[in-house]
Image (tube, rainbow, N blue to C red):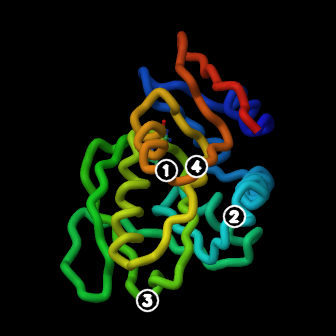
Amino acid sequence: MKELEERIRTDGRVLGKDVLKVDSFLNHQVDPMLMERMGEEFYKHFKDSGINKILTVESSGIAPAVMTGLKFQVPVVFARKHKSVTLSDDLYTSEVYSFTKKTSNHISIAKKYLSSDDKVLIIDDFLANGQAVNGLNTIIEAAGANLAGIGIVIEKSFQKGRQMIDKSGTPIYSLAKIKAFENGQVVFEEEDD
Ligand code: 5GP
């Protein structure tokens, strides 16, 4: 998505060797007009997949996920993060190692919001090593739901997540794909559609 790539070029800041800061439109201040156009892009890509639910993780996945849900006209569920979780019969939980915070969190979704009737599209802000997607997938499997696809706003293709998802065979669509960070600059993969 050219508009997103341009926004990353103008507003993004590379931190260290593998972190991109995009606080001005995605991770702190949110640009709702851009979010809406991203929702439209995900919708165009996945509209024939029979999706009836969008899943994400709080907090930065929520804005793009809600806009995508609006386009699909389906509910959006965000997994909640907890340092530790008091076991509850009413929750599906899994453990996720946070790439940016370098700690493990439990994420959970109430059982009443996910079932074997659901065909799910995961939406998240970033793909790095695929831990967040894995954690959500564990929950989807526990619920007997179906994972139809994964939509990522910013994929860092040089990290492990992309390969892992490709191996699993789940359809994935990323709006911006970063090939590398070079001298503090973002290098994008060529767009493939
Ligand atoms: P993964 O679980 O794929 O290793 O990492 C994805 C999660 O970590 C995303 O939900 C996102 O919150 C965070 N994340 C990973 N890489 C970055 C990054 O470069 N910048 C920001 N702001 N968040 C990131």
Q: Residue at x 46, y 62 (%)?
A: 57
- Residue 7, above or below 85: above
The residue identified by callout 4 is 172
Nearer to us in this view, 172 or 80: 172
The residue identified by callout 2 is 68
Cα distance between the residues tagged 4 and 1 = 9 Å
Whole-percent x, y for residue 110 in the image: 39, 82
Q: Quadrant of residue 64?
A: bottom right
The residue identified by callout 1 is 169
Q: Amino acid at mark 4?
A: Ile
Q: Amino acid at mark 3?
A: Lys
Whole-percent x, y for residue 133 in the image: 43, 54
- Visible residue check, residue 18: yes
Q: Amino acid at mark 2?
A: Thr
Whole-percent x, y for residue 168 in the image: 43, 50
SS type, badge 1: loop
Give the foreground label among 4 and 3: 4
Q: Which mark is residue 75?
A: none
- Callout 2 environment at 10 Å: few (<14), some (14 to 19), or many (20+)? many
SS type, badge 3: helix
The residue identified by callout 3 is 112
N-terminal label among 4 and 3? 3
